[in-house]
Image: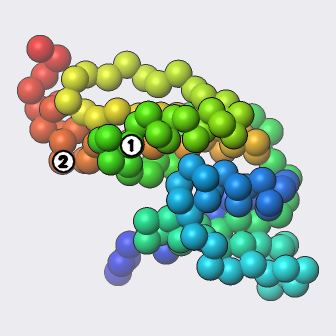
Amino acid sequence: MIEGLSHITFVTRDLDRMEEILTTVFDARKIYDSGDETFSLSRERFFDIGGVWVATMEGDPLADQTYNHVAFKMGPDDYDDRLARIKHLGLTLREGRARVEGEGHSIYFYDDDNHMFELHSGTLATRLARYAKGRA
């Protein structure tokens, strides 16, 4: 039986830069750093982001930017602050998709290794409720 999400892993060429992104944008809390030891494939660090275990491992970046992404929930009043943090770090913003009113707001951005992240203010329940109303 699946109990839920265990963790998310991002491979990055620069563990320090990824740590800066995670702690600045997501208020991540670092909970582990392997230092020079490698218990897995490479050096790694673990973070807690809103109760989600996020692992970062040293390695080659993704070759391309795609729409594959991980979305983290933000409060509805957090949009401007989070956007300012992303811009301060010089990260690449991606134009959001067209939205209907009431499904929440999103910020899409890429890190230096071509991972796409989304900060989203809605929930599945609010999105489904809005979609049930149709386009009008």
Is residue 121 something one can see in this rendering? no
Task: Give x and y (percent) for residue 136.
Answer: 12, 14
Residue to which mark 1 is pinned: 78
Residues 78 and 132: in front is 78
Residue type pointed to by label 2: Ala
Residue to which mark 2 is pinned: 125
Neighbor class of circle 1 (other Cα within 10 Å; few <14, some 14-19, many 20+) is few
Residue closest to the far right? 36
Residue ID at (72%, 72%): 45
Task: Give x and y (percent) for residue 54.
Answer: 58, 67
Task: Give x and y (percent) for residue 95.
Answer: 53, 21
Q: Residue 110 occupies which quadrant of the picture?
A: top right
* Mark 2 vs mark 1: in front: 1
Element at label 1: loop
Task: Give x and y (percent) for residue 18.
Answer: 72, 55
Q: CA distance from mark 2 to mark 1?
A: 20 Å
